[in-house]
Image (cartoon, helix red, strand yellow):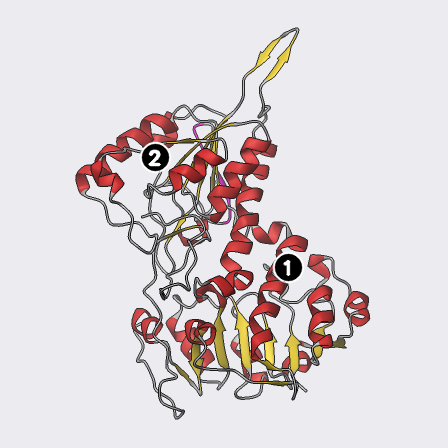
Amino acid sequence: MISIGVPAEGKDEPRIGLSPETAKKLVKAGAKVTVRSGAGLRSHFSDQDYKEAGATIAKTDAEAVSGADVVFTVRRPPLALAKAMKKGAALVGMLDPFSDAEGLDALAKTGVTLFAMELMPRITRAQSMDVLSSQSNLAGYKAVVDAAAAFERALPMMMTPAGTVPAARVFIMGVGVAGLQAIATARRLGGIVTATDVRPAVKEQVASLGAKFIAVEDEEFKQAETAGGYAKEMSDAYKKKQAELIAEHVKNQDIVITTALIPGRPAPKLISKAMIESMRPGSIIVDLAAERGGNAELTKPGEIAEHKGVRIFGLLNLPGRVPVNASSLYARNLQAFIDPFIDKDKKTLAIDWEDELAKGTGIARDGAIVNETIAERLGAKSATPARAAGTATKAAPAKSRTNGGAKAPAKKPGSTRQPKGGKTT
């Protein structure tokens, strides 16, 4: 019988990798599920909820994972937890594979097999496993809701006998999954919404949501997208024209939401100090790239900064601020991912290393990092542990993305799906 363990997350992470719903499905599939006591409380899942779903409650994290064939986490766990796992067990979570080379290498050397869900191939059958999309969708929603709550003015236009209340102007920079949800949410709240992205294909998506697309639409812009749906590097001349257009547009906005992230690298600066100073006092910037330094020049990660009356929200982990939904969706992503690797007859873990799901997300096996791209990015040596030939993976290079909707796809004719949202540089 396959055993699945779920530890508690750190103090800054309210989400959990298992919901009572997915626990019930896994138990029905023949798995033994063990959850650390209290691990789901910050997502409002009680121990009793898990018990009713058929799970066992463990007193400690070590007890929850010690005999597990698979361990579900949200964040990269501490080294001590990996050491408590049995060798060869699969650790599945958002492992932040492009940072902290030393920590990732130490985690790999424990003998645990690592699967980074951020690297999920963008193929049709993996849509239900796409953690970046599920979490970024909530981040885009929460960004608008937080901005609206802090704005101190009404968002929709209101006509009253005493006069008209003008609608707030909301500008979304980066039309990926988070950006698209931010547009939709701001429109539902009655804002006048505009958006920008370096890919011409998203113009239609922006318009379909009732927003106006802002960009320098010259010939270079029309050729700014690769066959895989990613943004090409633009010329300096185009960048200058686009920057001038955006600077002129930003100064008239009430709320600006930025979403441009590059995995493992500092976030690109989209809003300068001068642009912030051009905005009206009371305006708000919500920076969804704060975890990588921010898209705004004055962003302070983890804080709400203020400059000349403009507030810049650099709060981290926005999906974690709606933990019930975030955990429920994330848990479904993990359950959908592991399900194909469960032998339904023997009720055991049977990872097919030729499957593109395993190839794309598997980053460490048999004590070493096996994903060549990650090893190269981290400055480590790509290892080839003793195993069947052809099982080492080589992931596509990291691409610039808007917050969540984008990963580098492994294109195969007829098997890929259109990227949700886009990439920005």
Q: Nearer the viewer, mark 2 or mark 1?
A: 1
Q: Picture coordinates of residue 204 (x, y %)?
A: 41, 38
Q: Which amino acid, mark 2?
A: Lys
Q: Work out whether 147 lies above or below 43.
A: above
How many discs appear?
2
On the rendered structure, is 160 left or right of 405?
Answer: right
> Is residue 305 inside the magenta stretch?
yes
| Tag 1 residue | 327
Q: Work out whether 88 lies above or below 74.
A: below
What's the mark number on residue 352? none
Please provide the residue range marked out in magenta. Answer: 302-308
Q: Picture coordinates of residue 67 (x, y %)?
A: 65, 86
Q: Residue at x 42, y 64 (%)?
A: 415
Task: Determine if residue 205 is in view.
Answer: yes
Q: Which amino acid, mark 1?
A: Ser
Residue at the front extreme, as displayed? 414
> Is residue 174 inside the magenta stretch?
no
Q: Picture coordinates of residue 238 (x, y %)?
A: 21, 38
Q: Residue at x 47, y 79 (%)?
A: 107
| Tag 2 residue | 273
Q: Which type of secondary structure does the marked residue at label 1 adopt?
A: helix
Where, quadrant-wise, is the N terminus in this rendering?
bottom right
Mark 2–mark 1 distance (CA, rounded to whole Å) = 36 Å
